[in-house]
């Protein structure tokens, strides 16, 4: 694989309500949005242009929307859509774990909820959003077809090398962190003439033989030895290290090691991902104290400094789509085979 001259870095934040559970139609707060100016200031210090993927509850809250309007006015970020189906109208389905996955709803309901969120963003911010992520990664071909109909250009609903089947979600365990153009009816098939770009959330391996590592991990997770925690043993022995490009799950050192590996391998785009609610202690299991908050911001600063020093180009999701050349040097079909 030929290394590109300059790797792009996308930073995507699921910009959402404070409350993760229970799944219900109302009763949400959005206090964590008050931390976004602090995050934006950190990003701007390092030339990072984040993409805030916002939920319906955030968009329709006057205070939260005002904060995001101020950030958008600086021209240093992008606002896209993040659909939480359990609290995005219309509400015709029971709020259950299965129905928290957008992909499990009827096609008509999937479309109606995405359209409601899109209309709310357009009405509130005066923009037509062009980037999208399904809440809880509940992606489907219906989602993709709806995005195309509504004028979206880029999706980021796939978590590379991850299987959400345990909570009735999609299985991405054979999908690498490789951006690719696609047709809405074939959401996992690379199509250089496709109207949409998929930019998966970056999860990768620190080892060179990525396909082999992923095959072993998938086998251990699904086979008769899955209860023996062998994946953790292999990780501690540095035999197979799967790393998410997320400060919620990985240290700055781990994220930098992954970025270096993927840069050398010729991947064109890194997609860092995390939740806005992680910025406030006690709202997620990732950050439970003010000390955790400090470590999170320090981890981001360390990675952003690395990205600046190595010469990564910071872009928003839609900017990545506009500069994407088409066919990739890394074949999606080959990696997934």
Image: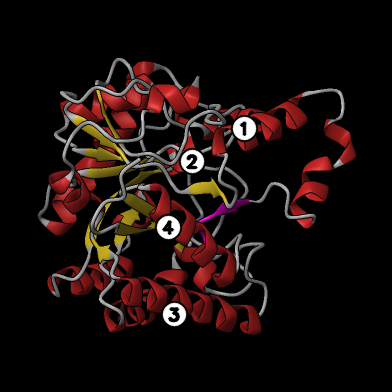
Q: Position of residue 204 (x, y in %)?
A: 53, 47
Q: Secondary structure at mark 3?
A: helix
Marks 1 and 2: CB-CB under 8 Å?
A: no
Q: Secondary structure at mark 2?
A: loop
The answer to which of marks 2 and 4 sits earlier in the sequence is 2
Q: Position of residue 10 (x, y in %)?
A: 32, 57
The answer to whether 294 appears left or right of 329 in the picture is right
Q: CA distance from mark 1 to mark 4?
A: 24 Å
Nearest the camera: 305 or 283? 305
The answer to which of marks 1 and 2 sits earlier in the sequence is 2
Closer to us: mark 1 or mark 4?
1
The answer to which of marks 3 and 2 sits earlier in the sequence is 2
Seen from this angle, which residue lies furthest front? Answer: 2
Closer to us: mark 3 or mark 1?
1
Q: Which residue: 55% across, 45% down?
A: 208
- The residue labelled by disc 1 is 212
Q: Verify whether residue 99 appears in magenta.
A: no
The answer to which of marks 1 and 4 sits earlier in the sequence is 1
The answer to which of marks 3 and 1 sits earlier in the sequence is 1
Q: Residues within 10 Å of mark 4 (few under 14, many from 20)?
A: many
Nearest the camera: 293 or 91? 293
Q: Which residue: 62% across, 47% down?
A: 22
Seen from this angle, which residue lies furthest right? Answer: 228
The numbered disc on residue 272 is 4
Q: Is residue 215 visible?
A: yes
The answer to which of marks 3 and 4 sits earlier in the sequence is 4
Nearest the camera: 240 or 81? 240
Q: CA distance from mark 3 to mark 2?
A: 23 Å
Q: Which residue: 51% across, 41% down?
A: 136
The numbered disc on residue 230 is none
- The residue labelled by disc 3 is 301
- The residue labelled by disc 2 is 159
């Amino acid at each position: 694989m030929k290394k590109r001259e300059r790797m792009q870095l996308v930073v995507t934040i699921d910009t959402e309500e404070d409350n993760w559970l229970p799944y219900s139609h109302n009763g949400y707060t959005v206090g964590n949005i008050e931390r976004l100016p602090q995050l934006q200031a950190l990003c701007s210090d390092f030339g990072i242009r984040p993409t805030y993927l916002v939920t319906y509850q955030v968009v329709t809250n006057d205070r939260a929307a005002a904060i995001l309007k101020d950030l958008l006015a600086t021209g240093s970020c992008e606002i896209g859509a993040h659909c939480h189906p359990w609290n995005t109208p219309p509400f015709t389905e029971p709020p259950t774990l299965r129905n928290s996955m957008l992909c499990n709803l009827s096609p008509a309901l999937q479309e109606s909820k995405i359209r409601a969120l899109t209309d709310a963003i357009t009405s509130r911010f005066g923009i037509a959003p062009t980037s999208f992520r399904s809440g809880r990664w509940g992606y489907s071909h219906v989602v993709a077809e709806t995005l195309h109909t509504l004028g979206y250009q880029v999706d980021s609903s796939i978590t590379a090398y991850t299987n959400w089947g345990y909570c009735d979600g999609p299985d991405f365990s054979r999908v690498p962190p490789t951006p690719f153009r696609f047709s809405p009816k074939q959401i996992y098939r690379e199509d250089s003439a496709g109207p949409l770009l998929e930019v998966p959330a970056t999860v990768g391996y620190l080892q060179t033989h990525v396909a082999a590592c992923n095959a072993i991990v998938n086998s251990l997770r699904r086979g008769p030895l899955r209860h023996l925690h062998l994946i953790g043993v292999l990780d501690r022995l540095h035999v197979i290290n799967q790393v998410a490009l997320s400060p919620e799950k990985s240290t700055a050192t781990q994220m930098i090691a992954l970025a270096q590996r993927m840069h050398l391998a010729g991947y064109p785009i890194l997609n860092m991902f995390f939740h806005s609610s992680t910025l406030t202690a006690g709202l997620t299991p990732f950050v439970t104290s003010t000390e955790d908050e400090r470590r999170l911001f320090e981890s981001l600063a360390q990675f952003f400094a690395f990205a600046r020093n190595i010469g990564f180009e910071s872009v928003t999701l839609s900017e990545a789509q506009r500069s994407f050349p088409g066919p990739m040097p890394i074949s999606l079909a080959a990696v997934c085979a």
